[in-house]
């Protein structure tokens, strides 16, 4: 049986395939899928595949730091936010590094400019990998610089 992490309600993680060395995420067991803040999204074709280019401000309140990302589109889904509002979102698969463990998870891309966290880490990504201690924060070490 794989080792299970204990995580707090917020954690630092990395998205190495996207070039994001660290981003603060809210651990949200009420959200099925994880969500990443994007301030622009541009779908495009790469050969016969559908891809998406998007920009991320990985640090809350810092509009100067920008990471431009590209990824193959896995799906497009209608997602309801906590207020019940429906939004069509692109879905990608990417690696997440959390607490020294690396795993693949689905992320939906959406504008979270007015939200407190640039990323939500949903329950599907955590299933079988982590237990959540809701009264604690930052139980996992902050990621070191990722190697690309």
Image (spheres, grey):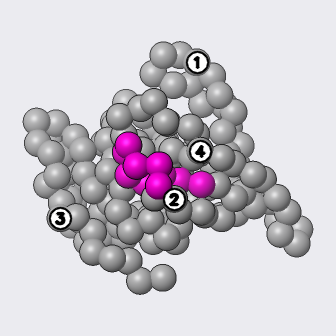
- The answer to whether mark 3 and mark 1 are in CB contact below 8 A is no
Q: Which quarter of the figure has residue 68?
A: bottom right
Foreground: 103 or 98? 98
Query: What's the residue at 88%, 72% (across, down)?
Result: 47
Q: Farthest residue to the bottom: give it.
A: 147
The answer to whether residue 74 is magenta is no
Residue where numbered disc 4 is placed: 39
Residue 120 in view (yes/no): yes
**Residue numbers of the magenta segment:** 55-64
State the SS at label 3.
Answer: loop
Q: Residue 41 at x, y = what percent?
A: 69, 48
Mark closest to the chain's N terminus, 3 or 1: 1
Please give the residue where the numbered disc 1 appears in the rendered image: 85
| Mark pair 3, 4: CA separation | 27 Å
Q: Earlier in the sequence, mark 3 or mark 4?
A: 4
Indicate which disc, 1 or 4, sits on the residue closer to the N terminus: 4
């Amino acid at each position: 049986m794989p080792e299970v992490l204990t995580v707090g309600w917020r954690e630092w993680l990395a998205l190495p395939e996207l070039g994001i060395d660290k981003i603060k995420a809210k651990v949200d067991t009420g959200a099925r899928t994880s969500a990443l803040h994007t301030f622009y999204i541009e779908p495009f074709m790469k050969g016969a595949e559908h891809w998406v280019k998007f920009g991320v401000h990985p640090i809350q309140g810092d509009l100067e730091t920008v990471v431009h990302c590209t990824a193959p589109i896995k799906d497009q889904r209608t997602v309801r936010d906590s207020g019940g509002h429906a939004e069509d979102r692109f879905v990608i698969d990417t690696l997440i590094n959390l607490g020294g463990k690396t795993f693949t998870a689905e992320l939906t891309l959406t504008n979270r400019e007015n939200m407190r966290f640039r990323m939500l880490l949903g329950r599907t990504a955590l299933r079988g990998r982590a237990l959540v201690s809701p009264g604690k924060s930052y139980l996992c070490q902050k990621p070191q610089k990722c190697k690309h």
